[in-house]
Amino acid sequence: MNESSESPRPRVARWEDADRASVLALLAEYGLQLVDVPAGAPIPGSYWGDDEAGLIENRLYARPDTPLHSILHESCHYICMDPTRRAALHTDAGGDYDEENAVCCLQIMLAGRVDGYSAGACMRDMDRWGYSFRLGSAQAWFERDAEDARAGLRARGIDPATGKRTDGAFPAPTA
């Protein structure tokens, strides 16, 4: 019997499994550029280290093994920030409790816009990864206890029904 102090990696959707085109298109709507990091290399701008996504200004860094929910989560921090924070962003997204709730809500909403992924899959991945919610699961929180998060999105100029900015912060890309 092989005893290991390391726990196995949670089974979650990873960047290497994702529909790249739909993720890149989604991030581009918000002015984010995804930068691929080679497998096993340190991820620039990663607050948590390991395989977690990193943020530096408008660049999101991910390795093939980066969880898709982490890519969405860090992207949503960027989306929820004001322009001053975005311009100075390096590794620590900062924010407060209300922003974290808004970010979690938005990442679930945007997951449904990634081909082959869904809000349900994102919530399962969040639970498997160890996100903690008062009602015990991401789905219970999102469905029954996230009104404050939706209000936080509204306060940040984000439509809580669509996840789109309503304040013109990210103008549509021109061809």
Image (spheres, rainbow, N blue to C red):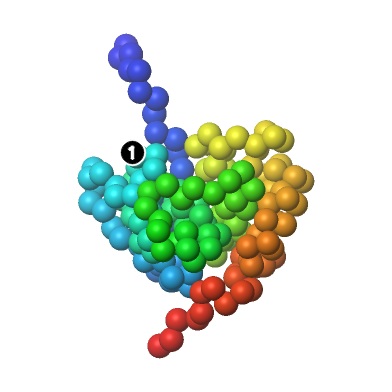
> In this rendering, would 76 be left or right of 149?
left
In this view of the protein, which residue sits in the foreground, 17 or 130?
130
Q: How many marks?
A: 1
The image position of residue 158, as x and y in percent, is: 63, 66
The image quadrant that residue 24 belongs to is bottom left
Residue at point 60% right, 70% down?
Answer: 164
- Residue situated in front as seen by the camera: 136 or 146: 146
Quarter the C terminus occupies: bottom left
Residue 173 in view (yes/no): yes
Q: Is residue 4 above or below residue 52?
A: above
Q: Is residue 6 above or below residue 52?
A: above
Residue 28, quarter of the rendered image: bottom left
Q: Position of residue 142 (x, y in %)?
A: 69, 48
Q: Would residue 99 be found to the left or right of residue 63 on screen?
A: right
Image location of residue 4, percent across then percent down: 33, 17
Any part of residue 66 in sight: no
Left or right: residue 34 compared with residue 124: left
Q: Residue at x 63, y 62 (%)?
A: 156
Towards the viewer: 144 or 174: 174
Q: Is residue 92 above or below residue 156?
A: above
| Helix, strand or loop status at disc 1 | loop
Three-letter amino acid code at disc 1?
A: Asp
Q: Residue furthest bottom?
A: 175
Residue on which disc 1 sits = 50
State the residue at coordinates (50%, 37%).
Answer: 129
Q: Quadrant of the N terminus?
A: top left
Question: 111 above or below 92?
Answer: below
The crowd level at tag 1 (other Cα within 10 Å; few <14, some 14-19, many 20+) is some
Residue drawn at x 35%, y 23% is: 6
